[in-house]
């Protein structure tokens, strides 16, 4: 019984150790693409990088996504700074923006951008979903 | 085989229902986790991805640490504190670590006593505290696992709500960590207190956790 418990504790310790440091390459690449598209004001590329939920929240009425995104204030000044990845969520700090990303079908997509920090509250973002 | 099953029935029973309950927790936890994932715009995860996730690990570890804390405290506190009439307590005049003769250590050991109980010195000192030590280490290990896994799960939630993640020390003083911890501790302490008090007045015929049915309420440590 003690041996079984020791094995269980070992599995739990390994599990917690393994999930502590997921890779950041995909996140950095997606954030770089987003910032480049924002600098180039390439609304089609920006829409391609958004999560479906964020795209849905950006669009109002009969607008297409590129039309809706063109109206937003999305800073593109880079480069990518600090990156935090936890499970299938990530946060990227750039010079003039903080981005939030979600992993969907193996790819990192932007779930919130144009975000400003608010003390004690979630970020206020130009687009989020 | 039949004899083995009879002689180890108690640990086999609890070991089996432990594994079944853990599997049930994994299955139901996965269903709830995937509901949350879909409602927050993320994608569903597989069973394997869930059971190796921080979310499952923290849910398991927070319960483990409180169980080991319960047994650690019960083992240690009952050396010095008694409850007259309870089967969970020893007699009031036996308070303390008791004499070597009562504990059958060193030269008072029997022929079939464990080796480390007979040897004396540091080995007997270590062995004399081994039960509480192991329970205490399992408690600390589970609490550490809870804090690491809890931080990872909490930070994923934070990012999903477009908020900043927290450091490990920041998580240790967070409401999430203490709410998870204290909701488990209070239920363990209530269960122990109930077992201590109920065993004074109530009986379960044939159970070693109970006094004999006809034993008086005042009889302490009278299991049978």
Image (tube, coloured by chain):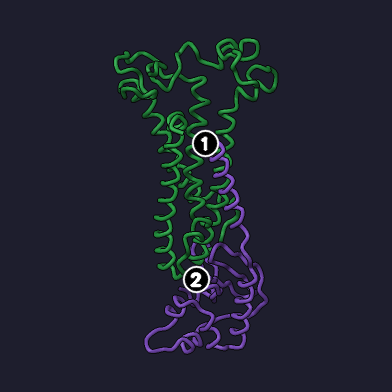
Which residue is at the front of the view, A1 or B69? A1
Residue B27 in the image, given as x and y percentages of width and height: 41, 55
The numbered mark at residue A85 is none
Residue B26 in the image, given as x and y percentages of width and height: 44, 53
Which residue is at the front of the view, A62 or A25? A25
Label 2's element? strand
Q: Residue at x 54, y 59 (%)?
A: B155
Q: Residue furthest front?
A: B1
Image chain in purple: A
Residue A110 in the image, given as x and y percentages of width and height: 53, 75
Q: Residue at x 55, y 11 (%)?
A: B102
**Res. A60 image quadrant:** bottom left
Q: Badge 1: how crowded within 10 Å, few (<14), some, or many (20+)?
A: few
Residue hosting label 1 = A1
Image chain in green: B
**Res. A24 image quadrant:** bottom right
- Measured in 3D between alpha carbons, the distance from the residue under mark 1 to the one under mark 2, in whole angstroms, is 52 Å
Residue hosting label 2 = A124
């Amino acid at each position: 019984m003690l041996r079984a418990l020791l094995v269980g504790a070992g599995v739990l310790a390994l599990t917690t150790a393994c999930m502590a440091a997921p890779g950041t390459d995909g996140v950095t690449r997606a954030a770089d693409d987003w910032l480049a598209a924002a600098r180039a004001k390439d609304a089609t590329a920006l829409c391609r990088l958004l999560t479906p939920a964020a795209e849905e929240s950006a669009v109002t009425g009969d607008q297409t996504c590129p039309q809706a995104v063109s109206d937003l204030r999305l800073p593109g000044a880079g480069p990518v700074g600090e990156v935090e990845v936890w499970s299938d969520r990530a946060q990227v700090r750039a010079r003039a923006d903080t981005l939030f990303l979600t992993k969907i079908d193996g790819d990192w997509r932007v779930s919130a951008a144009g975000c400003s920090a608010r003390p004690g509250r979630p970020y206020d973002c130009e687009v989020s979903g | 085989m039949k004899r083995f099953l009879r002689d180890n029935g108690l640990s086999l029973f609890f070991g089996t229902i432990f594994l079944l309950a853990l599997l049930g927790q994994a299955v139901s936890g996965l269903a709830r986790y995937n509901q949350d994932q879909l409602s927050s715009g993320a994608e569903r995860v597989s069973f394997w991805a869930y059971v190796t996730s921080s979310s499952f690990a923290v849910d398991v570890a927070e319960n483990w640490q409180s169980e080991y804390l319960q047994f650690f405290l019960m083992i240690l506190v009952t050396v010095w504190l008694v409850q007259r009439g309870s089967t969970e307590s020893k007699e009031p005049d036996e308070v303390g670590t008791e004499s070597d003769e009562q504990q059958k250590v060193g030269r008072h050991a029997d022929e079939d006593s464990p080796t480390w109980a007979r040897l004396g010195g540091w080995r007997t000192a270590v062995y004399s505290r081994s039960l509480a030590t192991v329970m205490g280490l399992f408690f600390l290990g589970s609490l550490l696992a809870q804090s690491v896994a809890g931080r990872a799960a909490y930070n994923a939630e934070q990012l999903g709500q477009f908020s900043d993640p927290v450091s490990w020390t920041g998580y240790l003083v967070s409401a999430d960590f203490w709410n998870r911890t204290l909701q488990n501790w209070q239920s363990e302490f209530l269960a122990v207190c109930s077992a201590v008090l109920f065993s004074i007045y109530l009986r379960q015929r044939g159970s070693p956790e109970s006094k004999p049915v006809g034993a008086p309420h005042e009889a302490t440590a009278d299991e049978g």
